[in-house]
């Protein structure tokens, strides 16, 4: 199922993150439990990070496709939260071997990792990248 890129936020870093809202896979993803900040593996899920399309693939018929080239990308080691490129996010995901994918009720106005990881409503986890 196609997810509007406006319902996503790609965040660069050593461990890249993809935030989703209004995702049709929200209820299929496991409830996130990361009180100590260690994001668990999202069993049965994977991500295929590409410049034009990003695929989040789950068990059975669960999955989404994001038109990645049109999606917002922020962060990076040198840029804080300044806009960055999808090609850089894909390179981050390749180096990390995957990405953290979190499905939320709504995208946050400001990034507060401790609040996101302990909200009790976020779903997802680390998804390994497929070649």
Image (spheres, rainbow, N blue to C red):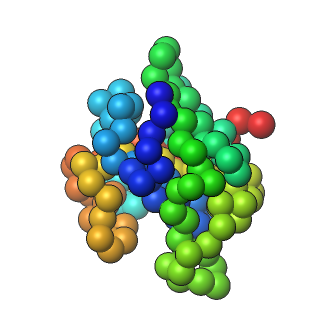
Q: Residue at x 54, y 36 (%)?
A: 65
Rendered position, 42 above or below 72: above
**Is residue 115 among the parts visible in the rendering?**
yes
Nearest the viewer among 113 and 53 is: 53
Rendering quarter of residue 109: bottom left
Instruction: Look at 47% across and 50% down and name the residue there.
Output: 5
Q: Residue at x 47, y 28 (%)?
A: 1
At which x and y percent is residue 46?
Answer: 59, 34
* Percent x, y of residue 104: 30, 49
Q: Residue furthest left?
A: 120
Q: Is residue 96 visible?
A: no
Rendered residue at 42%/54% (across/down): 6
Pick the front one: 43 or 25: 25
Query: Residue 78 placed where, x, y %?
Result: 64, 85
Side of 37 relative to 96 (left or right): left
Q: Quadrant of residue 32?
A: top left
Residue 61 versus residue 26 in the image, above or below: above
Q: Quadrant of the C terminus?
A: top right
- Along the horizontal axis of the image, is 117 left or right of 1? left
Task: Report the number of discs.
Answer: 0
Horizontal side of 113 relative to 55 (left or right) equals: left
Seen in the picture, residue 102 relative to 25 is either above or below; the reply is: below
Q: Name the residue nearer the viewer: 83 or 29.
A: 83
Spot occupied by residue 122 in the image (x, y as percentages of width and height): 30, 48
């Amino acid at each position: 199922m196609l997810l509007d890129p406006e319902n996503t936020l790609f965040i660069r870093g050593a461990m890249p993150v993809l935030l989703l809202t209004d995702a049709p896979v929200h209820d299929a993803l496991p409830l996130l439990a990361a009180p100590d900040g260690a994001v668990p593996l999202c069993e049965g899920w994977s991500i295929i990070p590409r410049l034009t399309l990003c695929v989040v693939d789950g068990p059975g018929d669960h999955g989404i496709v994001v038109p990645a080239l049109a999606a917002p990308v922020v962060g990076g080691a040198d840029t804080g939260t300044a806009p960055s490129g999808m090609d850089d996010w894909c390179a981050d995901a390749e180096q990390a071997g995957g990405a953290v994918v979190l499905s939320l009720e709504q995208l946050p106005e400001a990034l507060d990792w401790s609040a996101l990881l302990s909200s009790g409503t976020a779903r997802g986890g680390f998804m390994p990248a497929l070649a």
